[in-house]
Image (tube, rainbow, N blue to C red):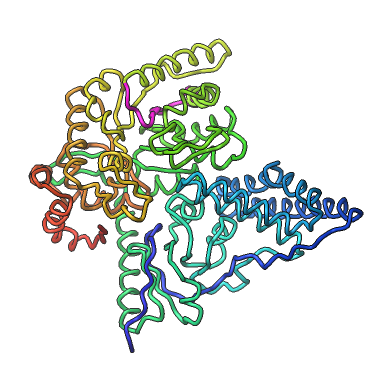
Amino acid sequence: MSDPRTLVGHGVSPGIAIGKPVIVENRPLPVMRVPLSAGQIEAEVARLRAAAKRAAKHLFGLAKGAAKTVGAEYASIFEAHRLMLEDPALLDEVERLIRAEAVNAEWALEQVTHRLLGQFQKLGDVYLRERQTDVLDVAAQLQRSLQGRKGPGLGHSTELGILVADDIPPSQALQLASRGVSAFASESGGITSHTTIIAKSLEIPAVVGVAGLVAAVEKARLLIVDGFEGHILVDPDPALIQVYSLRAEEHRRRQQEMLGLAHLPAKTLDGHAITLLANIDLVHEIAAAKAAGAEGIGLFRSEFLFLQASPALPDEEEQEAAYAALIEAFPDGPVTIRTFDLGGKKLAREVLGAPEANPVMGLRGVRLCLQKPDFFRTQLRALLRAGGRGPGTLRVMVPLIGHVEEVKTVRVLLARFSQELRSEGHAVPARVLVGAMIEVPAAAMIAEHLAREVDFFALGTNDLTQYTLAVDRGNEQVSSLFRPFHPAVLRLVETVISTGDRFGIPVSLCGEMAADPLAVPVLVGLGLREFSMHPPALPVVRSLIRALTFREARRIAHKALSFASAKAVEEYLLEQLSGLLSHLKVRIRL
């Protein structure tokens, strides 16, 4: 049999799945322009409103089902979609077009949808382009309601299969847990889309961004989805099926085996202790973090509360409830909540109000929060109220710090709101731990000055690499230059860790680098004592730490810093770790 066709995309959720393709075409049916007489316009507007009510009712049902099967946090995505049906930017615009041009609702809806998507594209923002999935999902729900069609489903078969689609909206992704789907692959999608977040949380292998996928697998009988490498193998021969079956079984076995060791300390062979924390986006992930042996939360991306509530803003009580749930879940460990990191590639028009020519370098992180004091006040008050509800160590982490004055301002605000809340009868923490997220090279260079103002550092190596190397990792033309092992990045990491050690403040690393097996000995050798990562990566990192000696890690780190290029560093680390990784059967990816 000839070699299989291999399709290449982006592996966004690790794992291997083998199964029959279940192809779902989510592209809408063609819509015709139907002129209306003056006497038909009001009836058409009424038909639009009735269809919107039916779609909203359908979304409400999906939210209830999702709440039962995968948790309230995911159900809130459907609720957000339901609210979008009431957003004047969509429904009122469709109604206006029906009246202005005397056309049918289907045609008007399609024109308004295209206009909204065009506005997103003009912003040139990767994160917003991925938010288009939500807009398209809502518009498709309404269009199907107008046409009297049911929403796309996964059928009634309980047989495991691989969902293949041009695009997979969140409303389908949320069905994956209960409908026997073992993996999904799509032509569109990105690393920060709702669908990707859901796949990671449910630990379902996923590959997105595969050009021409649907046509390529239309007649396929079997697929292999490799979420590690981002590959899809079409009609593989029996030998490859056996190889990947063994890899999948070995991965499952090793994950279970390492989860069984979650209660063991992350300590090197010569007794050097490391704290392992979890990065989470949704409160629903607490259980997975605890099962993987996380000792606390190293990064809670609070902006997902905003994205779930959009187009509204989460109020003080909603935020307090989410933060308190995290603190209560880890009463003995740190719970680090990052203040809203909106802006840049997570541009929120409801907050920012206007597009920027260069959003990555613009109004984002702490800069945005300080320029929107009412918005920031709500979050800081919610954090203080949650921190005062019981035991647990709350750490407030401020993103994109580049100036000492920014930290000082946040401290002043926290003190002011603490006094304000006490006067209202609320309990607040006696002391709030404030940390700076080090993701701008300037912050790393003035680390000793920042250390006098903060209680901890958190290295955000994703942005630190991007800003240090002037590489937008979302830009396919230069993404190959995004190399966290570049000596310049490693030296900045070393500077921050050593500064934290000199000033006696904790330093954690919560970027993707923390979960990379190649980086573990380097970071341990540089003296990093807190690693924070997505829960599924914790077992592998724990096993690697327990197989190392601190003395050997220091030697590896020292040597890695001597090289002149990222390629040389990576090749050296591969050589050093080949024996260890073979023993642990840990799969790595460069």
Instruction: Point out the stretch of residues depicted in magenta.
Output: 386-403
Query: Residue 465 vs residue 416: left or right?
Result: left
- Residue 524 colored in magenta in the image: no
The residue under the point 28% across, 54% down is 540
Q: Position of residue 179 (x, y in %)?
A: 56, 66
| Quadrant assignment, res 431 | top left
Q: Position of residue 312 (x, y in %)?
A: 62, 36
- Residue 388 colored in magenta in the image: yes
Nearer to the camera, 230 or 108: 108
Q: Residue furthest bottom?
A: 1
Query: Residue 340 vs residue 138: left or right?
Result: left
Q: Kindly tell me whether residue 385 is visible in this rendering.
A: no
Nearer to the camera, 477 or 483: 477
The residue under the point 64% across, 46% down is 79
| Quadrant assignment, res 173 | bottom right
Query: Residue 498 vs residue 42: left or right?
Result: left
Q: Position of residue 506 (x, y in %)?
A: 26, 29
Nearer to the camera, 295 or 314: 314
Q: Residue furthest right?
A: 39
**Above or below: residue 372 compared with residue 128:** above
Q: Kindly tell me whether residue 384 is visible in this rendering.
A: yes
Which quadrant does the N terminus fall into? bottom left
